[in-house]
Amino acid sequence: MESTLEKINSPNHYTDGGIETIDYIKAKMSEQSFKDYCRGHVLKYASRAGKKEGNSELQDIQKVIKFAQYWQDAIVGEKASLPEIGEDYEKS
């Protein structure tokens, strides 16, 4: 059985076929379209947090954070950790 983090970060049903679905989606979209896709998912999961049967509020907030990270990565252009409040993002 998948752990809660596996359900958020890399669920089995999104890795079928040897590629993460998010990687395939990103490869097929323009950079701006992918950022908009991530923004939409942030709004979706934030709006439904704690309201969808079978999903805890915590799971939905973790999904918000995951899609915000994808969005941030698209802006920064590479994997980056979240800065402290008030810090700027820096490319490594």
Image (cartoon, rainbow, N blue to C red):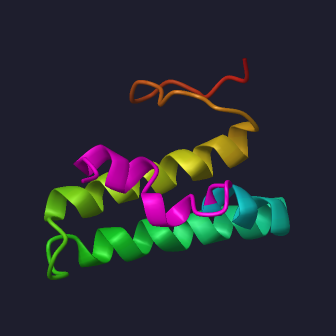
Which quadrant would residue 50 be assigned to in this image? bottom left
- Span of residues in magenta: 1-20
Residue located at (27% from left, 63% from top)? 60
Determine whether 76 is above or below 65 in the image. above
Residue located at (24% from left, 53% from top)? 1
In the image, residue 13 lies in the stretch drawn in magenta: yes
Residue 80, given in percent of the width and then of the height, sits at 59, 29
Q: Is residue 4 visible?
A: yes
Determine whether 63 is above or below 88 in the image. below
Q: In the picture provided, is 63 more to the left or to the right than 41?
A: left
In the image, residue 19 lies in the stretch drawn in magenta: yes
Determine whether 83 is above or below 42 in the image. above
How many marks the image carries: the answer is 0
Which quadrant would residue 72 be assigned to in this image? top right
Q: In the picture provided, is 71 more to the left or to the right than 60?
A: right
Residue 74, given in percent of the width and then of the height, sits at 70, 48
Out of 13 and 78, give the one closest to the viewer: 13
Out of 2 and 56, give the one closest to the viewer: 2
Query: Please, which residue is most extreme toward the top here?
Result: 92
Residue 71, given in percent of the width and then of the height, sits at 60, 52
Out of 34 and 18, give the one closest to the viewer: 18
Residue 57, given in percent of the width and then of the height, sits at 16, 64
Determine whether 67 is above or below 50 in the image. above
